[in-house]
Image (cartoon, grey):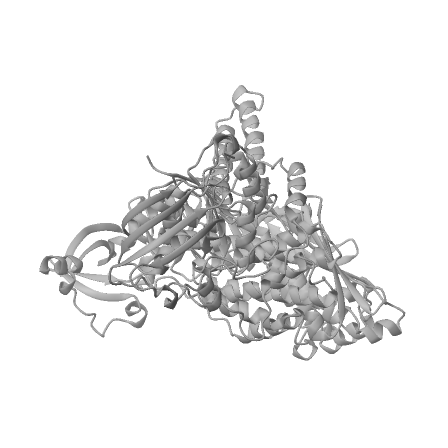
Amino acid sequence: MDPMAEIRDVFFQECEEQLAELEAGLLRMEAGDKDAETVNAVFRAVHSIKGGAGIFALDGLVRFAHVFETSLDQIRSGKLSAEPHVMALLLRAADALMDLVRAARNGEAVPEARTQGLVVEFAGLASGGAAEVRTVARVQVPVAPAPQAEPRRTWIIRLTPKASLYAKANETALLLRELSRLGETEVDLDTSGLPDLAELDPEGAYLCWTVTLETDRDAGAIKEIFEFVEDDCDLEIFERPNFNFFMEEAPVEEIVADNSPAPAHPYAHPPVHAPVHASLAPPPGGSEIETNTPSLHPVDVMAAQAETSSSVSATIRVDLDRVDRMIDLVGELVITEAMLNQRVLEAGLARTSAVAMALEELEALTREIQDSVMAIRAQPVRSVFQRMPRLVRELATQTGKQVRLLMEGEGTEVDKTVIERISDPLTHMIRNAIDHGLESPEERVAAGKTAEGAVRLTALHRSGRIVIEVADDGAGINRPRVRAKAIERGLVGADAQLTDDEIDNLIFLPGFSTAAAISDISGRGVGMDVVRRSVQAMGGRISIASRPGQGSTFTLSLPLTLAVLDGMVVKTSDQTLIIPLGAVLETLRPNAADIYPLDNRNSVLALRGGYVPIVDIADVLEFGQRSTIPEQSVALLVESEGGSRAILLVDEIQGQRQVVIKSIEANYRAVYGIAAATVMGDGRVALILDVDTIVSVTRETVRTDFARVSSQGS
Amino acid sequence: MALTVLTVDDSRTMRDMLKHSLVAAGFRVLQAEDGIDGLEVLKTETPDVVVTDINMPRLDGFGFIEAVRRDVERRSMPVLVLTTEADAEKKSRAKAAGATGWIVKPFDPVKLVDAIRRVAA
Amino acid sequence: MDATQAHHDIRELIAFRVGKQELSINIMSVREIRGWTSATILPKAPRYIRGVINLRGAVLPIIDFAVRLGLPATEPTARNVIIVVQNHQKQIGLLVDAVSDILTLNSNTIQPTPDIASESVSTFLRGLIPVDGRMISLITLDNVLPAEGLAAV
């Protein structure tokens, strides 16, 4: 790979880290964190992005980062205080910066309008607003005067270093060496300033050099050599034959300000400085930055902090591809181990034999390796959570509601495969909470609540899964309305007896949210049924609990990884299938007397006083003739993530085992009724059943059949 | 023998970029992530020139230079600071802290190498 | 100049037999050739999708090329082979009767496909190559897999 392209990748990767840091820091500041290091970290994040963007000539990004950084610098130096309206602007600027970074990465143009308003607002923040705009302008102007070929001229350069020149590790000899590179030089050393040895300060400066330089380079080239030392020496440069140096154009890039106490007379330097300053005279109407001496020197503070934080935790950066490769390999190891196990079993070795026992040990070890490797790829949900404050701000603006977002458990870890797929459902849950859950400020006040509503986002581990909750303190689900709507849409019968819980969960039914019900925000054309389906597709479940007047809580529960799955191995119509163990409630042998056919295809099983639709998997998946009649089959009572139950008929159960999930879509495409695949001990591919699809489709057909049967009966 | 340059910068992009430019110019490059880290490197290494960023966590460029100048054995080490644009205040503060010179970001690799050679003994 | 020009036009193809037909594909897209192993059938797949097999941990769909050409399904035996090919980001296996030849030829020997080919076949037929009195079809892999949109049916 081209090294610059590699550095560019590093830059954008680093930008993401810095953007996350930036937002986290701003949020801490918004919450009242006054720690100097928090402001510093925020400043550094923007500053670093600007620095990197400069390398890649991302001018729009540089310009905006600069304006942003200038305000942060003012907060840092105490000239601007972190009032709520300032913080709000900074947070919006952070969002815009993120957009600029993403656009730059994708090589897209960012509409000027995205940042223009913010730039104006920033200008309004600063008391000397005009100064800000001018500073920006200065960044844009490239300051590289092309070296001009000039006729040979002779220059006299008189250099009298001060002690400070040596204190900063500059060397007269090096300056002379540089001069000699410009042309022919003649050097005279004046030692008349040397004191007696007894009075000589070993770190003092007593010498004076006069250099005669014959060169075709201009005065700018000579001055450039003394660029670093001009405040630490007396310097005179003049041309020997005709004294026209002062007509030269001065380089633009020069020092404007001096450090500590500003000189009473800014031009009290050797003559060479005069034209330089003149060319940089303050632009009309502007105030100079140099008046701003920092009120606080952060070095001591930081050095003190460094003492305590010097024990850096030992971490390494690893390319994600390497970890993915390792996880794949461990997956192979698990499969190979299973194959070995099967061979040993087939060979008829006793369970107590040394081989079988060693194999058991290998199995335990393999599991442990797998867990450890998975842990490497585990990431805190922070990266997803961090995107939510922005969403909440946008939604609050759009809806005119006041929203406070509280987040807990951002450090909760989950496999990368899951992280990547949490974002969408989470976004919908939050949209729903703000759009439908929270009331308007007026309604809240009328109900005796604070005008500002709260949305709490929580992540935690619970029994081998990650649970994410989105709770609002809004009005709760309007059950009569939801019920009426469900009846109107034909989702439930008009006389259906539903518990509160069942009513709440109606919002997940396909067809509940239709165009009329979808506002701009929650909608984007997607109802909660789609959210539920996508959650179920990764082996997760979503539910809602609500208390009228007090709010609703969405609960999302997901497996910790999408890489492995505990499954039940079944066989039907000579095909081996895996059924996710989490979906299986119980296994049973159905009684012929309990099976009621609805027609020649569908039937239901009477189970503990209710009826559960029966699904013959071989039939649904068109594997061909069912090899057993229902009463000789094995029945699995399964529950879909949505809580619907069904009986799955299979020929036999072969056992339970953990399987490594393999994508079918990677080389093919999505397959009906199948969630994924795995490789079995014999090296063959087995398909993992998508229980929810099977159950939901079956319920549809059974429902219509039921309706037909009962209408015929009456 | 190749000149050894220590770069002190908390931005990986900038460290990579510096390294890329300096290695191409035939320098040996040492890297540190902030001032504290830089001082740590200086305990065992004696680079010919140090190039340091200003805004860094834990110990910034000003503090780093001051620490270098306080160290009797390191005080004569040329230290160049990286500053974005022609930030007058930063430059003068860096000079007050004892910086030998500066390099303006975004830097031109040729100018960077020039500046380093100019201060390297 | 001429030498490099000619070099660019040289193509290497792998020829294989399906029934009585001989076809060929660009050798660059071939990853490996392996013997037949029975495939796990996929529900509701098109008839020419034989199923999936395990290729070193990856799930590889197998296309019965005879069915894709409108011929009766292959009754695979140990003599049949699977040509593993890479097409865009996906790897697929082509179940064929046998690999017959490796051809090195100049692209100007490839003749255009006559219009008479049936529509399902012409979607991936790219030309005809006369070799020693045989006629070998050159195919492209682009339309061999079913389109994504059919997934739900």
Question: Considering depth in this image, is A53 or B116 the residue closer to the camera?
Answer: B116
The quarter in which the C terminus of chain A is drawn is: bottom right
At 58% across and 38% down in the image, what residue appears?
A371
**Residue A344, position as x, y percentages in the image:** 49, 28
At 58% across and 70% down in the image, what residue appears?
A131
Question: Considering depth in this image, is C13 or B67 the residue closer to the camera?
Answer: B67
The outermost residue toward the right is: A448
**Residue A154, position as x, y percentages in the image:** 28, 57
Question: Considering depth in this image, is A214 or A301 the residue closer to the camera?
Answer: A214
Please tell me how many numbered marks the rendered image carries: 0
Q: Quick check: can you spot residue B89?
A: yes
On the image, which quarter does residue C121 sit in?
bottom left
At 33% across and 49% down in the image, what residue appears?
A211
In the rendered image of this protein, does residue A258 appear above or below residue A653? below
In the rendered image of this protein, does residue C72 appear above or below residue A333? below
The outermost residue toward the bottom is: A516
Question: Considering depth in this image, is B14 or A629 the residue closer to the camera?
Answer: B14
The outermost residue toward the top is: A354
In the rendered image of this protein, does residue C114 appear above or below residue A577? below
**Residue A13, position as x, y percentages in the image:** 50, 53
Q: Quick check: can you spot residue A618?
A: no
In the picture provided, is A404 more to the left or to the right than C109?
A: right
On the image, which quarter does residue A498 sit in?
bottom right
In the picture provided, is A36 more to the left or to the right than B8?
A: right
**Residue A77, position as x, y percentages in the image:** 66, 57
At 36% across and 64% down in the image, what residue appears?
A245
